[in-house]
Image: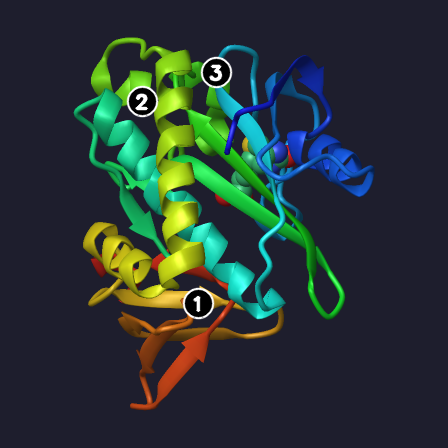
């Protein structure tokens, strides 16, 4: 279902914005909007997502799950697992997932995911936006991003076939989406935990108006992150930005 209809663009402002417009106009679930570059790629928390020409796969999937709107947060975890599966099929890289959905290789970000939902009592549509740094060069990230971002080509020392990777990611998104609809979150939770680099680490969670520090102890049955805070209390987060603390921070 996912990618059966693929709309390719040379340049758009943001594939999430284009997909959202299409979804509002009745475009069916499974349609994918893919661009070679984005002028205003959107990241989480209103950040910009660098999306240079030929640097990566920048695409958005339209979904219309008939689920409780609260359950759709699990779709970001689903995308992270499916992209890991796709990357592992095509390369020797084994990315780790930092909750909820950053894919890291050598501690640097290789993929970001931005899921946006339109809902009232029920879900109207979800736009699952995925950016994978495939063949981006180190210079293309600029001095600000170089310490925190990487690409498959940088890590492997060779270019990767983006078309093949795209097809593998569609295949795994399709598999996990069908499984999530029929079996719920449990199998996905296990697959996510298997690839995670967050649990058992000392972390900092930045929320809209507060910051919490502690040890990540689990992902619960809804997909929320559970941490043991420094005052010894277990606390759950459905949203937030996680930084993994290094020795120097402590
Ligand atoms: C993040 O880690 O902050 C999320 C980044 C998401 C980037 C992708 S690229 C394709 C899609 N279109 C966008 O404008 N954003 C997402």
Between disc 1 and disc 2, whose residue precedes?
2
Q: Which residue is mark 3?
A: 55
Of helix, strand and loop, which one carries label 2? helix
Relative placement, left or right, of 239 versus 178 is right
**Mark number, residue 205:** 1
For image coordinates 37% across by 46% down, the residue present is 176
| Quadrant of residue 155 within the rendered picture | top left
Between disc 2 and disc 3, whose residue precedes?
3
Can residue 53 be seen by looking at this rendering?
yes
For image coordinates 73% across by 26% down, the residue present is 13
Q: Which residue is mark 2?
A: 152
Between disc 1 and disc 3, whose residue precedes?
3
Of helix, strand and loop, which one carries label 1? strand
Task: Point out the residue furthest to the left here.
Answer: 92
CA gap, disc 1 to disc 3? Answer: 30 Å
CA gap, disc 1 to disc 2? Answer: 27 Å
| Quadrant of residue 197 within the rendered picture | bottom left
Pick whichever, 47 or 122, lies toward us.
122
Of helix, strand and loop, which one carries label 3? loop
Q: Are marks 1 and 2 in contact (CB under 8 Å)?
A: no
Question: Residue 88 location in percent, x, y?
Answer: 23, 30
Compared to residue 244, the image places residue 202 above or below, namely: below
Q: Point out the image quarter for the C terminus.
A: bottom left
Q: Nearer the viewer, mark 1 or mark 2?
A: 2
Pick whichever, 32 or 162, lies toward us.
32
């Amino acid at each position: 279902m996912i990618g059966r209809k693929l709309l390719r663009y040379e340049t758009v402002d943001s594939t999430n914005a284009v997909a959202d417009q299409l979804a509002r106009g009745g475009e069916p679930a499974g349609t994918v909007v893919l661009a070679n570059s984005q002028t205003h790629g959107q990241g989480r928390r209103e950040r910009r997502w660098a999306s240079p020409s030929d640097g990566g796969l920048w695409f958005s999937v339209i979904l219309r799950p008939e689920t409780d709107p609260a359950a759709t947060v699990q779709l970001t975890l689903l995308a992270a697992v499916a992209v890991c599966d796709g990357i592992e099929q095509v390369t020797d890289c084994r990315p780790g997932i930092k909750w909820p959905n950053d894919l890291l290789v050598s501690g640097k970000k290789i993929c970001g995911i931005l899921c946006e939902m339109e809902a009232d009592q029920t879900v109207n549509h979800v736009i699952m936006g995925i950016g994978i740094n495939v063949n981006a060069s180190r210079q293309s990230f600029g001095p600000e991003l170089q310490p925190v971002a990487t690409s498959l080509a940088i890590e492997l020392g060779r270019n990767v076939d983006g078309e093949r990777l795209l097809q593998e990611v569609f295949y795994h998104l399709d598999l996990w989406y069908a499984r999530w609809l029929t079996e719920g979150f449990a199998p996905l939770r296990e697959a996510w935990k298997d690839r995670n680099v967050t649990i058992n680490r000392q972390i900092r969670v930045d929320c809209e108006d507060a910051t919490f520090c502690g040890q990540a102890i689990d992902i619960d049955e809804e997909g929320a992150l559970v941490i043991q805070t420094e005052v010894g209390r277990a606390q759950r987060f459905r949203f937030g930005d996680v930084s993994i603390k290094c020795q120097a921070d402590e």
